[in-house]
Image: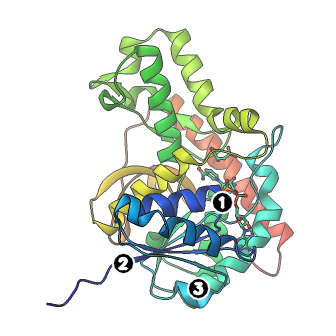
Amino acid sequence: MGQRKRRTVSIIGAGNVGATTAQKIVENGLADVVILDVREGIAQGKALDMLESGPLLGFDTRVTGSGNYADIEGSSVVVVTAGFSRKPGMTRDDLLHKNGEIMIEISEKIKKHAPEAIVIMVTNPMDLMAYTLWKVTGFKRERVIGMGGALDSSRFAYFVSEVSKTSVSNIQTLVMGGHGDLMVPLLNFSTISGVPLPKVLDPKTLESLVARTRDGGGEIVRLMKDSSAYFAPAAAVYLMIESILHDRHRVVPCSVYLEGEYGVQGAFSGVPIRIGSAGLEAVVELPLSSSEKSAFEASVKAIREGVASLHRHFPDKL
Ligand SMILES: NC(=O)c1ccc[n+]([C@@H]2O[C@H](COP(=O)([O-])OP(=O)(O)OC[C@H]3O[C@@H](n4cnc5c(N)ncnc54)[C@H](O)[C@@H]3O)[C@@H](O)[C@H]2O)c1
Ligand SMILES: O=C(O)C[C@H](O)C(=O)O
């Protein structure tokens, strides 16, 4: 009997987020994984360490550590987690030019070696790195998807569960806009057992939930000092990959290139999308209030300014 071939997910950057994502994928038997890093031996060492846990945990999925882009050929999904993370006192945008340079190089290699893959961008500033990769590869917008909203919404849900003393499984939250300081937690589209938050929580509590969600990444950076978050980010990436590989059609807030949706023409920003085997299947449009619309537009404006800065900094490459 012929065996069904497992699909491969490649992860560029075998650091905290990359390696933790790889571990979740192989431990759950979702796909084989290639992890690739510029630092000699890091990806190979982490891959071997993970494989040695296979007999204990009972998985047969394979993980390969590599420094060679030929190994990502044939990947269904490529996740990009390579680059610098911020330190206390920095914003994600402070990484723009350093990570932009790395992203231009990586995008050229992905274009050459995995031209059919769906790419999930993680590296910060994520919406701008997704733009960079989309621009350099020329991939269709359906195949370049940024991870941010899934993480921000999960943080928001966790904070709501804490203050309301309710199980996370009864809470649904939505954060739109860029994955940055101007992200937009949407109170009216966030619920406890189907009831919108403003109907169950007082305005002061709501305000502090929004502020803590916007600062969610920064709070972790201040605690850890030499690293940013990676457990929840890896879980968010995993959810997106699972929806792609199992064609689940989940609705997840992700950063995609908008072509008129939400009144935005030609910019990456976080919006709810249906995600399946083709990548972006549809942008889900919600009826935003005028204040929600203005907050979303302010976030998109900041992303457009970042794009302009990238073009000024890399005039010949973008
Ligand atoms: N979008 C999100 O929600 C989100 C969440 C968490 C982290 N991040 C971002 O993801 C990135 C990675 O975070 P991390 O915690 O894993 O950092 P990390 O420092 O642990 O890992 C980064 C890895 O990238 C590798 N790298 C650098 N340049 C490379 C290149 N040219 N090719 C291949 N590999 C290269 C490094 O050697 C390192 O191993 C950061 O930019 C961080 O800000 C984004
Ligand atoms: O906050 C960061 O710099 C990392 C990431 O974007 C996060 O939200 O955890």
Give whichever of 201, 298 is nearer the camera. 201
- Helix, strand or loop status at disc 2: loop
Identify the residue shown where x is 37% and y is 42%: 286
Within 10 Å of disc 1 (Cα), the crowding (few <14, some 14-19, many 20+) is many
The reply, left or right, for residue 2 in relation to residue 38 is left
**Mark pair 3, 1: CA separation:** 17 Å
Q: Which quadrant contains ligand 1?
A: bottom right
The answer to whether mark 1 is within 8 Å of ligand 1 is yes
Residue nearer the viewer, 305 or 145: 145
Element carrying mark 3: helix
Residue 214, given in percent of the width and then of the height, sits at: 62, 33
**Residue under label 3:** 111
Q: What element carries label 1?
A: loop
Q: Is residue 256 visible in the rendered structure shown here? A: no
- The answer to whether the residues at label 3 and label 1 have Cβ atoms under 8 Å apart is no
Whether 112 is drawn above or below 238: the answer is below
| Left or right: 65, with 60 as reference point | right
Residue at left offset 33%, top offset 79%: 6
Q: Quadrant of residue 69?
A: bottom right
Residue furthest toward the front? 56
Amino acid carrying label 3: it is Lys
Q: Which mark is residue 123?
A: 1
